[in-house]
Amino acid sequence: MTARIDIVEVGPRDGLQNDAANLSVAQKVEFIHRLDAAGVRRMETGSFVSPRAVPKMADSAEVFRNINKDEGRSRIALALNEKGVRRAIDAGADEINFVLVAGEGFGQRNQGMSPQETADMLALCAPLAHDANIALSATISVAFGDPYDGEVDPAIVANLAAQAQRAGAAEIALGDTIGVATPWQVRDVFERVRIEAPDVYLRAHFHDTRGSALGNVYAAIEAGVNIIDASCGGIGGCPFAPAATGNVATEDVVFMLERAGFDTGIDLDRMIDTAKWLETVLGHPVSSSLVRAGRFP
Ligand code: COA
Ligand code: ZN
């Protein structure tokens, strides 16, 4: 039996929120449908935050309105506060991914909240998602390091995870927003989180800012995580993290995992083709290795 690793494609949200390019709604919708055709089942499709804070996501409701709603696919909306959760529900999201922060400095700049305030906000908003029958997950951002405050105590991450579990999040992702995690740290923090939030699915979200992302994916899987965030082409980053760069590239993750015998359900050739198409609409090259080197000869 082949072990399954589920990929959550984050290109249309994390990817596009920080890219210099301004895609039209039609181009975003085409991107999403190309990703569907490449086998993606779960996708961060947009975010419902202040349009002044993140102008590139201001059209998310329109994007949600224009995409195919297939059974068996989950269109994920990012939200950070009550207004965002309400907008995501109205837009027809299948799932809300709520963002907690593990660092004070990043939390204040990204969403004007302390770590505890983000956990309290999730507790306040979770019933809205539950009442609307929408899946609820949470990402703990800067879980491996804060761009303003430095090292993050794993005890804080584990405590936030416990609170998210209590609020009813079914899945918790640990986010390396600024790409500073190492594989050994990934193992330790996930082990710690699993002890304090034993009843949730765990997901990993890595940026490749400093070259460790694929190693971190390996470490997360070794630690028992079987859901990985990745973005087509390796685009992405957070506008509130200095020098942020892209997520680990979906095609690079899929290549590594399938060569190791895992099943991801992603069609690698179609994903590479989508990354090449993306270069044409973004107007610049993407960073993934597979786009340059191609698959196993
Ligand atoms: N969607 C749209 N607008 C929103 C909103 C939402 N979810 N939440 C707040 N706003 C609007 C308010 O209506 C208000 O508008 P007004 O000035 O026209 O009256 C304004 O934003 C300020 O509202 P306030 O509640 O005081 O929020 P804030 O200024 O403390 O900002 C956030 C909080 C979370 C809305 C803001 O920091 C934000 O959107 N950050 C985005 C971070 C992000 O997406 N990072 C990348 C992904 S992690
Ligand atoms: Zn990210």
Image: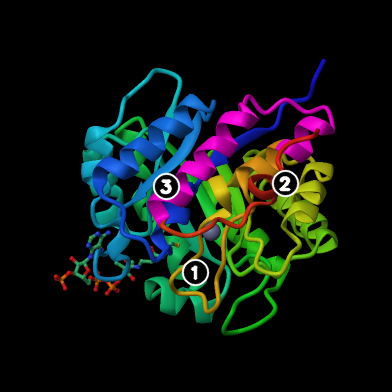
Q: Residue at x 81, y 33 (%)?
A: 297
Give the quarter of the image for residue 83: bottom left
Q: Main secondary structure of the magenta part?
A: helix
Of badges 1 and 2, the one in the foreground is 2
Q: Residues within 10 Å of mark 3 (few under 14, many from 20)?
A: many
Q: Residue at x 30, y 70 (%)?
A: 53
- The picture places residue 26, in percent across and down from the top left corner, at 26, 41
Q: Amino acid at mark 1?
A: Gln
| Residue at image mark 3 | 12
70, 24: nearer the viewer: 24
Up/down of 286 relative to 105, above or below: above
Q: Amino acid at mark 2?
A: Ala
Q: Residues within 10 Å of mark 1 (few under 14, many from 20)?
A: some
Q: Amino acid at mark 3?
A: Pro
Q: Does the CB distance between marks 2 and 3 fall below 8 Å? A: no
| Residue at image mark 2 | 293
Q: Which numbered disc flags the more N-terminal residue, 1 or 3?
A: 3
| Residue at image mark 1 | 116
Total labels drawn: 3
How far separated are the C-alphas under marks 1 and 3? 29 Å
Of badges 1 and 3, the one in the foreground is 3
